[in-house]
Amino acid sequence: MDVNALVAQSYAASRSATLPEQSGATQTLFSAAESFAATLQKSEATAMQSMTSGADPHALVTALAQTELAVQTAVTVRDRVVEAYQEILRMPV
Amino acid sequence: MTDFSDAMQVASSGMKAQANRLRHVSENIANADTPGYRRKTVGFENVVNAGQATGEVRTGNVRLDQSALTRIYDPSHPLADDSGSYDGSNVSLLIEIADAREAQRSYEANLKMFDQVRQMSSSLSDLLRK
């Protein structure tokens, strides 16, 4: 009985350690994701405009190049995060 | 990333300005035989946003070249005056071709800068991948 109570207590204590942390890092990630989505949206709008109403081709090329770089960065960062996560999962317990 | 995208914007504005300049050069060449046509020139100016220069460039107002028009002798021409000659345009094809070539070279320089920025930014994110 005593052991059970102790186990339950330490389990409850260790659960809080795995809860997601609400910190400044989350906010930074959110704003990064938002600016990434904004870049994508801008380039889509420019591409659509240049196809329909013949907008400036320079603006299209600039927007597409910026989107390419943003996607490249996002993919690289995602790969690194997933890799780090897998590294933690592989840790011998 | 902002320096990279700013550099891209600046290079793109340069290309836009050179394209606009080339447009006016081709207008001049197309009107080389138009009587009374004065060649158009455009100047470049800084783009100022909220009182601060952004580093971008754009073409300014169109100005007309005030040099003398060429007198062309052709008594059968409807515009010919008493002396049998009329005012042609003041477009010199040699100057226009030189201007077009200069616009092309500047465009290429801006294009090179654009590509350079792209390569630098791409190799920076390649560094993360290894």
Image: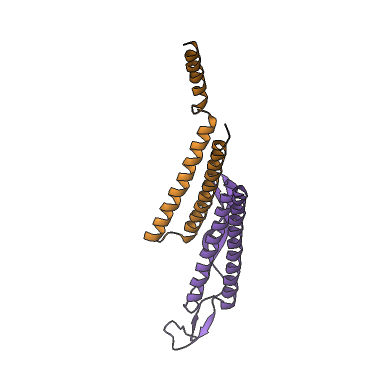
From the viewer's perspective, is residue A25 above or below residue A56? above
Q: Position of residue B113 (x, y in %)?
A: 61, 59
Give the image's coloring scheme.
by chain
From the viewer's perspective, is residue A22 above or below residue B98? above
Pick out the residue farthest to the top. A2
Indicate the chain coloured purple by its letter: B
Q: Is residue B101 left or right of residue B80?
A: right
Q: Position of residue B7 (x, y in %)?
A: 59, 52
Residue drawn at x 56%, y 73% as measured from the top left: B96
Q: Position of residue A86 (x, y in %)?
A: 54, 40
Evaluate whether residue B38 shows in this view. Answer: no
From the viewer's perspective, is residue A20 above or below residue B110? above
From the viewer's perspective, is residue B15 above or below residue B127? below
Depth order, front residue of B43/A9: A9
Residue drawn at x 56%, y 36% as measured from the top left: A88
Q: How many marks?
A: 0
Q: Position of residue B58 (x, y in %)?
A: 54, 57
Residue drawn at x 59%, y 72% as measured from the top left: B101
Depth order, front residue of A75/A5: A5
Hue of chain A? Answer: orange
Evaluate whether residue B43 shows in this view. Answer: yes
